[in-house]
Amino acid sequence: ASVARIGGRDAVRISVADDGKGIAAENLAAIWEPYVTNKPGGTGLGLAIARQAVWAHDGTVNATSTLGKGTEIQFTIPANGAGAERID
């Protein structure tokens, strides 16, 4: 995670990446929808809830994926206070 000036404001960006099988481009938008999962026993609620939490804090979410290489999810939310400490 890091605190940086993004789009003219201090923000916290958290990136989570894996080196799994990746998600096909045509399926990428659906990962944010409730009850969408390809895991046995999964509920498909994790990313849907995370997106709502980020949006509730005026943040953004983004996902990129390459088949056979993995997926990266980025969450960006405004930092509290003008003098936020930078964490790398």
Image: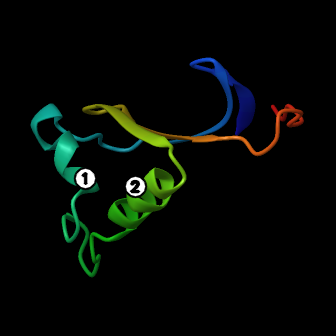
Q: Nearer the viewer, residue 7 or 28?
A: 7
Q: Position of residue 43 (x, y in %)?
A: 28, 77
Q: Nearer the viewer, residue 45 or 58?
A: 58
Q: Quadrant of the C terminus?
A: top right
Quarter-wise, where is residue 48 in the image? bottom left
Give the vertical position of 88 relative to 77 (above or below). above
Q: Quadrant of the N terminus?
A: top right
Q: State the residue at coordinates (63%, 18%).
A: 8
Q: Position of residue 19 (x, y in %)?
A: 44, 39
Q: Is residue 18 visible?
A: no
Q: State the residue at coordinates (25%, 69%).
A: 39
Q: In the drawing, does residue 26 fall left or right of residue 29?
A: left
Q: Position of residue 61 (x, y in %)?
A: 42, 41
Q: How many marks?
A: 2
Q: Nearer the viewer, residue 35 or 78?
A: 78
Characterize the local packing of mark 1: few (<14), some (14-19) or many (20 or more) Cα atoms within 10 angstroms.
some
Provide the secondary structure element on which disc 2 rests: helix
Residue 31 is labelled as 1
Q: Is residue 31 visible?
A: yes
Which residue does the numbered mark 2 point to in the structure image?
Answer: 51
Could you tell me the amino acid type at mark 1?
Ile
